[in-house]
Amino acid sequence: MVDIFTRIAAMVIGSFLLGIGINGFLVPHHLLDGGFIGIALLLQYYFHFPAGLCSALLSLPLIIYAWIKDRKQFHGSFYGMILTALFIDLLAPFHFFLPIAPSAILGGAICGVAVGLMLRYETSTAGTDLLAYFIAKITPINIGILFVIIDGLIVLSGYQVLGMQSVLFSSITILVAGSLASICYERF
């Protein structure tokens, strides 16, 4: 029973922290997180689609893969995806208006701790963190390095739309997030 409650707590706390990190720090400066949430933020910035809902829809293929390959991870990821989508969309009105540099660092730190916590207890947002989890299980590549590579490619894809300043500060965000996700996942 303790294991189930610990996973649920990690899922709820991690999803809530993601909602705060994204809406509180990244959205006010049109910064991107990596992964499906980053793609969903691009859709939100330019088409006003709800980022949480978009990230959940983008995650469905990975959820199906988790169902086939790792049922324990599937359950944590499916419910984590739902909770994360809800918290991102429910907390959308809450913004902290700090300068861009502290926002990039704090947003990355909060998102990294959230993802690392969720992965530590075998749950996730079912986005590219789940993809990184599966890759890390079959390769010797550190999960934090995988986050940086995957997320970096997604942030770079936003260059044409958001410009260089957003790409640079979003890169800081994902470096901080990847580092803290790795620390939380592997050491605590």
Image (tube, rainbow, N blue to C red):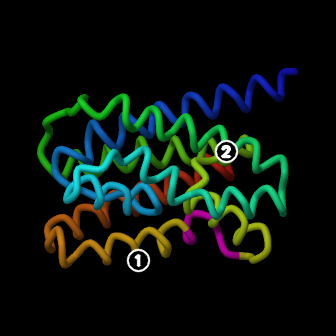
Residue at point 76% right, 50% down?
74
Looking at the picture, does residue 91 appear above or below residue 155?
above
Mark 1: secondary structure: helix
State the mark number for residue 134: none
Any magenta on residue 123? Answer: no
Taking the image as shown, residue 175 lies to the left or right of residue 150, namely left
Taking the image as shown, residue 167 lies to the left or right of residue 152, namely left
Amino acid at pointer 1: Leu
Any magenta on residue 145? Answer: yes
* Place of residue 67 in the rendered image (x, y in percent of width and height, measured from the top left): 79, 56
* Place of residue 87 in the rendered image (x, y in percent of width and height, measured from the top left): 44, 32
Residue where numbered disc 2 is placed: 78
Looking at the picture, does residue 128 appear above or below residue 93?
below
Instruction: Determine the image quadrant of residue 128.
Output: bottom right
Looking at the picture, does residue 20 appear above or below residue 68?
above
Tell me which numbered mark, 1 or 2, is placed earlier along the sequence: 2
Label 1 and label 2: CA atoms lie apart by: 25 Å
Mark 2: secondary structure: helix
Quarter of the image that includes the N terminus:
top right
Outermost residue toward the right?
A: 1
Chain part drawn in magenta? 141-146
Pair 1/2: label in front: 2
Taking the image as shown, residue 159 lies to the left or right of residue 37, namely left
Residue at point 26% right, 42% down?
25
Local crowd size for mark 2, using a 10 Å CA cut-off: few (<14), some (14–19), many (≥20): many
Local crowd size for mark 1, using a 10 Å CA cut-off: few (<14), some (14–19), many (≥20): some
Tags 1 and 2 in contact by the CB under 8 Å rule?
no
Determine the main secondary structure of the stretch shown in magenta.
helix
* Place of residue 116 in the rendered image (x, y in percent of width and height, measured from the top left): 59, 47
State the mark number for residue 153: 1
